[in-house]
Amino acid sequence: MPRFTFHGRDDELAFVETADDFDRLSETYDAYDGARFHILSSSGELRVIVGDDSGTGCWNISLGPIHCASPVPNWPVTVGAAPEGPGALLTVDAPADARLVEVMA
């Protein structure tokens, strides 16, 4: 089962860690205007956005459906404190066939 972990890092970067039973991969993405991702699986789709709130200076994470006609899948999700600085950390445990796709704004 893949696990996707999201949080903001530094001034304008989103940090994403992907882990499964065999491997662990950490990547950074430009998040100047918010980093947007889709987690796609045969059992559902989930949209995740990581962005810096200019009003508070904190990293915020949102999740929701990719399409209004498709419900948010019932996958295990945990929220906690980011390891660096103020902000949230989101972890999604997705089905075995899930893949992460960066969505360009």
Image: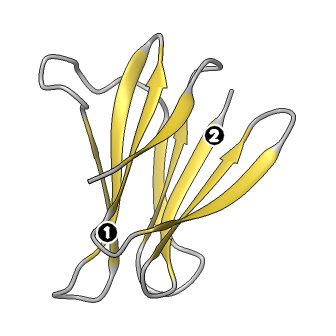
Query: Could you say which is closer to the camera, residue 88 or residue 99?
Result: 99
Left/right of residue 90 with respect to residue 63 in the rendered view: right
Image coordinates of residue 104 in percent, x first then y, are: 33, 50
| Amino acid type of the residue tagged 1 in the rendering | Gly
Name the quarter where the N terminus is drawn. Answer: top right
At a point 51% along the width and 58% down the height, the residue shown is 6
- Label 2 neighbour load within 10 Å: few <14, some 14-19, many 20+: some
Image coordinates of residue 10 in percent, x first then y, are: 51, 86
Query: Could you say which is closer to the camera, residue 3 or residue 104?
Result: 104
Read off the residue under disc 2.
3
At a point 48% along the width and 49% down the height, the residue shown is 78
Which mark sits nearer the N-terminus, 2 or 1?
2
Above or below, 47 against 80 in this view is above
At a point 64% along the width and 60% down the height, the residue shown is 27
Q: Which mark is residue 51?
A: 1
Q: How many marks?
A: 2
- State how far apart marks 2 and 1 are (Cα): 20 Å
Indicate how the structure is coloured in the image. Answer: secondary structure
At a point 45% along the width and 33% down the height, the residue shown is 39
Q: Which mark is residue 72?
A: none
Mark 2 vs mark 1, foreground winner is: 1
Q: Secondary structure at mark 1?
A: strand
| Amino acid type of the residue tagged 2 in the rendering | Arg
Image coordinates of residue 56 in percent, x first then y, are: 22, 88
Q: Secondary structure at mark 2?
A: strand
